[in-house]
Image (cartoon, rainbow, N blue to C red):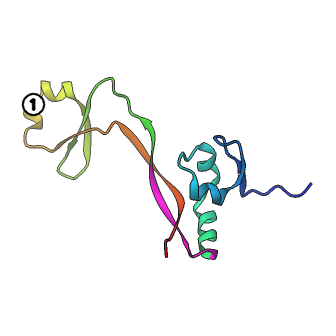
Amino acid sequence: MGKKSRDNIICPYTKQFQSLIVCAASCDKKCVKYKEKITFDILNRYVEKHPNYRIIGELMVTKKTDVKEKKFWVIKEDNTFVEVSEKEIMENPKEYLGKQIWEKPPYRYEVVISLKRIKA
C-alpha cells in the first residue's frame, strides 16, 4: 500500500473519497472535517500553482445564540458596547436615553475560506 495522502478526505455528505482542493472549490456545507483539514496555506499553495483560482472567505453560521430573553447592545462613548436585556432597558429608561441601541444578532458567524474559479 502506498502512502496515504493528507490532501484527501472522505466527505461525510457524499461518502466519496475526494481531494481537499475539490472540496474547497465545490463544497457548500463546509462541515467540521472541512474546517479541520482546509488551511490557508494549503489553498495558498494551490492558488500559486493555479492562477485561475483565488481564495475567498465565506460567512458561515456557527450557532444560534440563546433567545430566552431578548438582548440588546448599547453603544458607549468609547465605541464599545454593553449587552443588556430588554427588561433592564424598560426598568431604567433614563440611563439609555440618547444612546445607540442595537438588537443583538440571533446568530454567531465565522469566516471559512474556500476556492473560487476566476472567470476569464
Residue 55 in the magenta stretch? The answer is: yes
Q: Residue at x 64, y 60 (%)?
A: 21
Quadrant of the snapshot with the N terminus: bottom right
| Residue at figure coordinates x 75%, y 56% from the top left | 6
Residue 110 vs residue 103: left or right? right
SS of the residue at dot 1? helix
Quarter of the view holding residue 38? bottom right
Q: How far across and down, in percent of the image, does residue 109 sit? A: 42, 45
- Eyeballing the image, is 89 above or below 52? above
Looking at the picture, how far across and down is residue 87, in whole percent?
19, 24
Q: Nearer the viewer, residue 73 or 37?
A: 37
Q: From the viewer's side, name the closer residue of 69 and 119.
A: 119
In the picture, measured across the screen, residue 112 lies left or right of residue 88, that is right
Amino acid beneath label 1: Pro
Exactly how many numbered labels are in the figure? Answer: 1
In magenta, the rendered stretch is 49-59
Tell me where residue 30 appears, x and y as whole percent.
55, 47
Residue at horizontal 49%, vertical 72%?
119
Q: Nearer the viewer, residue 33 or 75?
A: 33
User: Overall secondary structure of the magenta stretch?
Assistant: strand
Circle 1 residue: 93
Expressed as whole percent of the image width and height from the top left, the position of residue 68 reads 33, 23
Does the segment drawn in magenta span residue 108? no
Residue at the extreme right:
1
In the figure, is residue 34 to the left or right of 57?
right
Query: Residue 58's image quarter?
Result: bottom left
Q: Residue at x 37, y 29 (%)?
A: 66
